[in-house]
Image (cartoon, rainbow, N blue to C red):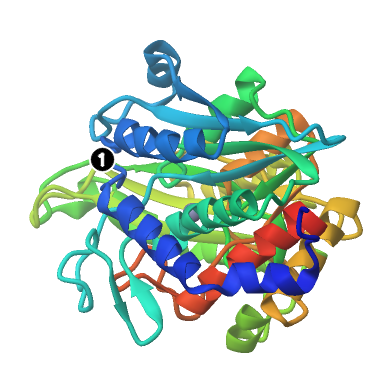
Amino acid sequence: MEEVRTKDNLEVAVEKEPTEKYLIDSLKDLVRIPTFVPPGEHYGEIVDLLITVFDELEFECERIEIPADIYKSWQRSDALHGERVNLLAIKDYGAKESIDIYTHLDVVPASEGWTVPPSPFDPVIKDGRIYGRGVADSKGTVAALLTALCIMNANSLESRYNLRIVLTTDEEIGLYSGLCFFADEGFLKGDYLLCMDSNSEGICVGTNGVLNWEMVVHGRSCHSSIPFLGVNAVENASVVIQELNVLKSDIERRESKVPCSPEITKITGQKQIKPVFNVTMINGGVKENLIPSSCTLRGDRRYIPEEEVDAVKKEFVEAVAAIKAKHGIDLDLYQVPGFPPMFTDPDDEWVIRVKDAASDAFGVSKPIIGVQGGLDIGYAVKRTNQPVCAFGVGSSADSNVHGPDENVRISDLNNYVKFLIRLLVSG
Ligand SMILES: [Zn+2]
């Protein structure tokens, strides 16, 4: 007779010893494939490894490569190499609803200053945490997903949703990630979308949109001993930066209705996410004794879900026109939109299901939050209109995502396995 599954014996299945070993071993295998981007050279290898696991779990797997012509029309960087291979793994449980479960397989490069593992791509365990590039962002969630699906298989637990697992390329580099391609080609078909590319601080329902900008301040060069014959572009750029600081404070006074995570509120006192304006790069001049003829400023503008990209661009153009008129400075502005913002109603049925499953599994009530960064799911759901929320592993306070010694608590990973089972089986 088939054993009846209850919440109690589910707990036993989730917590038994071999589960954690499987989880850690899977995560180590994933981290050891160096999918850092640029260049992003090992996507085929990691997808082939994952296909062997999903095959065993009786998923139908598709190895989906972005055609070279489409990829090249978006990405022109010489630093990127190799095929852009993505994975779609589908299992039909005969359920009424289906979900797309997404995260990315790429990671940022190793960076300087690692103290824990001998190599960022050879993970080690220390003091209840696992260290290695990508353990938090975002391979930990992939290992947790494999573990959850193995437990479900071993215990004959059916999913209440048909599952569509979407593991894709180039999220960390943009501009055209595997997820963007999936959205454009109609591969995202779930009634709901779970984004695992996040932390475990709360259920993320809002992200900012991104607009990168470049400004060329023009001058006229001459010998520096007779500067009155020229126009100093570097000095004029410093005037422009002063004026941009006024624009920055106007922009950053605004607030979204989307709350920040409690961790961010603790550090900054800020309660809602805000738009951001930064000058992040400056480049000008060729020699000490030469008045520079041009100076280039670059930066980013992150806009809240309540702002429209066209209005954001217009505001910047008008501010720059006023600076030019006030100071008689010659300059050109270029604006390049990146991922759009994302917003899902916190009262949406899907958000509530994810929040309940996460709170139950982690044993604390998980808040609804937003982040000031941008995600490629912003691009995807603008096309698909799927209800989406993001929940992952690690925390902004101590996982050191994108930095040296990236780590995640093993208890966090175990809780994430429980979260997925709650959501898929009983949620
Ligand atoms: Zn990520």
Q: Is residue 159 left or right of residue 350?
A: left
* Residue 132 image point, x, y percent: 31, 65
| Disc 1 target residue | 220
Residue nearest the viewer, comparing 318 with 86: 86
Q: Does dot 1 land on a helix, a strand or a loop? A: loop
Tell me: is circle 1 under 8 Å from ligand 1: no
Q: Where 74 falls versus 33 (above or below)?
A: above
Q: Picture coordinates of residue 37 (x, y %)?
A: 31, 43
How many labels were placed on the picture?
A: 1
State the residue at coordinates (14%, 53%).
Answer: 226
The three-letter amino acid code for the residue at tag 1 is Arg
Tell me which corner region of the image, top left, top right, bottom left or bottom right, holds residue 14. Answer: bottom right
Nearer-the-camera pick, 176 or 253: 176
Classify residue 202 as left or right of residue 197. Answer: right
| Closer to us: 297 or 365 | 365
Q: 234 left or right of 10?
A: left
Residue 19 in picture, x, y percent from top left: 49, 65
- In this orientation, does residue 330 appear? no
Residue found at x 59% / y 44% = 102
Q: Residue furthest front?
A: 1
Of the pair 177 and 296, the residue shown nearer to us: 177
Name the quadrant of the C terminus.
bottom right
The residue carrying pointer 1 sits among few (fewer than 14), some (14 to 19) or many (20 or more) residues within 10 Å by Cα, namely some
State the image coordinates of residue 364 (x, y, percent, origin top left): 73, 82
- The part of the image, by quadrant, that contains residue 105 is top left
**Res 226 visible:** yes
Residue at horizontal 45%, vertical 62%?
Answer: 23
